[in-house]
Amino acid sequence: MMSFIGLIFSVLDNPTYSGYIVDAHNYAGTFMVIVSLIFLLIGLPIYATKKTLIYIKINLKFFCKIKDILSFLF
């Protein structure tokens, strides 16, 4: 439904109503694409790296505890 409305907006040249013109819709779409690309190129790698480092830190603590327990037993 939303893509159909977008298609209608793309072929209209006159405003649908006075407060919202087609150009404003195009600017909003362009802004959405730019923000999405910035998030994908900058935000997602930072988030993935942070989560990976937390995962490695947790696993290192776990393996150090196992190593201490095994060294105590043997």
Image (spheres, rainbow, N blue to C red):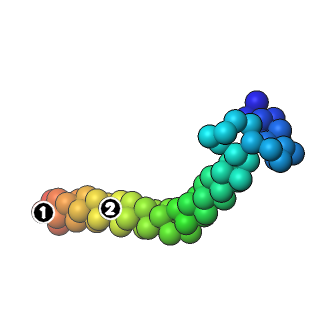
**Quick one: which residue is furthest to the left in this view?**
72
Left or right: 65 in relation to 54: left
| The residue positioned farthest toward the top in the image shown | 1
For this rendering, which residue is in front, 52 or 74?
52
Residue 59 percent across, percent down from the top left: 31, 60
| Residue under pointer 2 | 54
User: CA separation, marks 2 and 1?
Assistant: 27 Å
Q: Which residue position is annotated with label 1?
A: 72
Considering every residue shown, the one lying at the far front of the view is 18
Q: Secondary structure at mark 2?
A: helix
Whether residue 65 sits left or right of residue 37 in the image: it is left
Q: How many marks?
A: 2
Q: What numbered label is drawn on residue 62?
A: none
In the picture, the quarter occupied by the C terminus is bottom left
Of the pair 21 and 66, the residue shown nearer to us? 21
Q: Position of residue 4 (x, y in %)?
A: 81, 35
Q: Quadrant of the N terminus?
A: top right
Residue 18: quadrant of the picture: top right
Against 58, residue 46 (above or below) is: below
**Eyeballing the image, is 15 above or below 60?**
above
Q: Amino acid at mark 2?
A: Ile
Q: Earlier in the sequence, mark 2 or mark 1?
A: 2
Residue sitting at x 55%, y 66%? 38
- Place of residue 32 in the rendered image (x, y in percent of width and height, measured from the top left): 61, 55
